[in-house]
Amino acid sequence: LLQDSLDYRALTGLVKAYKHKGNNHSASIYRRKVVESSYIEGLEALQAGLYPQAQKHFETALGVVPDYSLALNRLGDIQLALGDSSAALKLYRRSIESDPHFAATHNTLGELLLALGQLAQAQAAFDQAIDLDINHIDAYLGLGRLYELQKKWNKSAAQYKTALLIDPE
């Protein structure tokens, strides 16, 4: 795993040195290991509620792979936890631009948009999550809550019933 003292400039310098010497394969392996270890350390810090440390690790991963959708998604989670829904919204959208096939990010975006009262956009995000993963239970639950807010009781009940069919527990 990465040491906290590892300086990002040193990391990128090492990757450039590998490439300069014609060791593209070695540089690629090294980059992948840096991204993986940074992401794992970021997750551990996030789970412990250590947001600044988690943010640092995810940003390190993004420094190596700028469009790493999972790191963007987790940075959005951090911003949301810190109360900055605007920054979270931007990060979730960047994550989706980077990897539009990850249902969980569409669902998380839908949850945030629902909380912000942007119901049409929230519905589109939940629908996209379901299109990508027909068994994404959280998206059905999100749609159920959305329809409740709109007082569309039958549609709401249908979404909850679908969620129960997927997972009766």
Image (tube, rainbow, N blue to C red):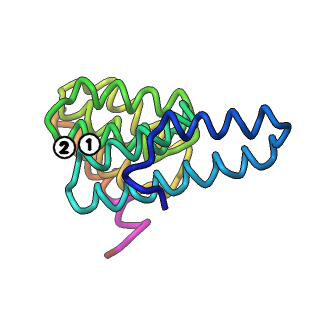
View extreme (right): residue: 22
Q: Which mark is residue 78?
A: 1
Tally the marks.
2
Residue 13, percent across and down? Answer: 60, 34
Residue 18 vs residue 80: left or right?
Answer: right
Q: Do the residues labelled 1 and 2 touch (CB within 8 Å)?
A: yes
Residue 166, percent across and down? Answer: 43, 66
Residue at x 55% of width, y 48% of height: 35
Q: Which mark is residue 153?
A: none
Residue at x 22% of width, y 44% of height: 145
The amino acid on which the numbered mark 2 sits, given as a three-letter code, is Ala
Residue 94 vs residue 77: left or right?
Answer: right
Residue 104, percent across and down? Answer: 44, 47
> Is 140 or 43 nearer to us in this picture?
43
Residue 169 vs residue 34: left or right?
Answer: left
Residue 73 painted magenta: no
Residue at x 41% of width, y 67% of height: 165
> Is 30 or 141 nearer to us in this picture?
30
166 in relation to 16, above or below: below
Q: In which quarter of the image is the C terminus?
A: bottom left
Where disc 2 sits, the SS reads helix
Q: Is residue 100 visible?
A: no
What residue did someone put label 2 on?
A: 81
59 in relation to 87, above or below: below
Q: Is residue 139 visible?
A: yes
Q: Quadrant of residue 153?
A: top left
Q: In which quarter of the image is residue 36?
A: bottom right
Residue 130, percent across and down? Answer: 48, 45
The amino acid on which the numbered mark 1 sits, given as a three-letter code, is Ile
Where disc 1 sits, the SS reads helix
Q: What stretch is highlighted in magenta?
A: 161-168
> Is 50 or 129 nearer to us in this picture?
50
